[in-house]
Image: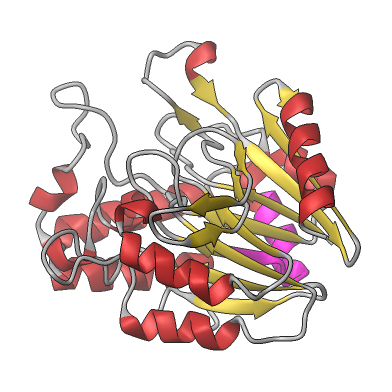
Amino acid sequence: MKIAFTSCIRYEAFKEQNEWDYIYDADPDYLFLLGDNIYMDYGIWPFTSEYVMAPKKYSIEKFQTIMEAKYINQFENVPAFKRLLDKMRAKNGFYAIWDDHDFAWNNAKGSLVNKEKKNISRELFHKYTKCSTNYPHVYYHIDTPLARVIFIDNRFDSEKTGKNKRLISEEQFSFIEEKINHQLPYTILSGGITLTQSSEKWSLYPQQLQRLCKLLENKEKVLFLAGDVHYNKFVPKKFLKHLNCTTPPQLISSGMQINLLGLGISADNRHNWGLLEIEENSININFFNRNKIQQKKSEKASTWLQKNLL
């Protein structure tokens, strides 16, 4: 079973996105988009009208109009992406989750986003991805032949400060706890942000990270897929002494269609994606960037997974 996964797609920077053809040719069984499927904001003022945090100032009507236009551009006006999407939907293999830029704006927490804007973004996410099995929620699960996959929403109910500081709600934790009980060989959790990498991560919410890890500690063959960070990375299991828990291994792929600094040169462009191949007793990961396969990174990750996960 083959799962292609990636994140961070900015149409405004890449109206032609031929890299989707590589995934098409790899013929995966599933395609997972792990957040920032559109970009409501990017860059700094005055170099762009959609600078970071600009959507916070938009009227409700402007917010909705701009967000829907962005979904139309990405999901309907990019030939290579649409061809892949049609192929994956035909085999019931397309699934997605969101992150900050397709939820509201950079680093947005649900408790600080206008309720109407939250509901608009959720409905537009559902309208164009058509993948949640837990409507109206963005968090949901699917069963594949070899794995139960749980998609985590770390935006809608998140709170940044105070005694209620959290990424996900009690309701979503209960959902995760229920869904990790299954008989399939693998458990895959997929979310917009990583557990331990970059400036936004689960480890900034230590009680919730500990709780998640404790839920998973007796499960075998657990993987965590994530995006957000604009690079590919494998992070092995890690014991967190201060929390007395161990994280599952993380497979991170981010920056399918994004430029890191907006320099307008090819060296600044990111075209990253991953291809996870699993069988009941074997596992392999290949990471790709604009220069095609990242051989050493892929081999190192696959070797660790074969030795320590199976």
Q: Answer whether residue 305 is visible to the viewer in this image.
A: yes
Whole-percent x, y for residue 90 in the image? 75, 68
Q: Is residue 82 above or below residue 187?
A: above
- Asked which quadrant contains residue 158, the reply is bottom left
In terms of depth relative to the viewer, which is nearer, 46 or 183?
Answer: 183
Q: Position of residue 37 (x, y in %)?
A: 46, 51
Residue 94: say if magenta. Answer: yes
Number of on-image labels: 0
Q: Quadrant of residue 261?
A: top left
Q: Position of residue 82 (x, y in %)?
A: 63, 51
Magenta stretch, overall SS: helix
The answer to which quarter of the image holds residue 20 is top right
Tell me if 284 is positioned left or right of 264 in this view: right
Picture quarter with the N terminus: bottom right
Residue nearest the viewer, comparing 284 with 163: 163
- Residue at (65%, 64%) from the top-left corner? 94
The residue drawn where x is 27% and y is 51% is: 66
Left or right: 310, with 125 as reference point: right
At 67% from the left and 34% from the top, the residue drawn is: 19
Is 153 a magenta residue?
no
In the figure, is residue 257 to the left or right of 186? left
Quick one: 305 or 95, which is closer to the camera?
305
Q: Is residue 292 above or below residue 213?
A: above
Q: Which range of residues does the magenta coloring cover? A: 83-95
In the foreground, 65 or 226: 226
Q: In the picture, which quadrant includes the C terminus?
A: bottom right
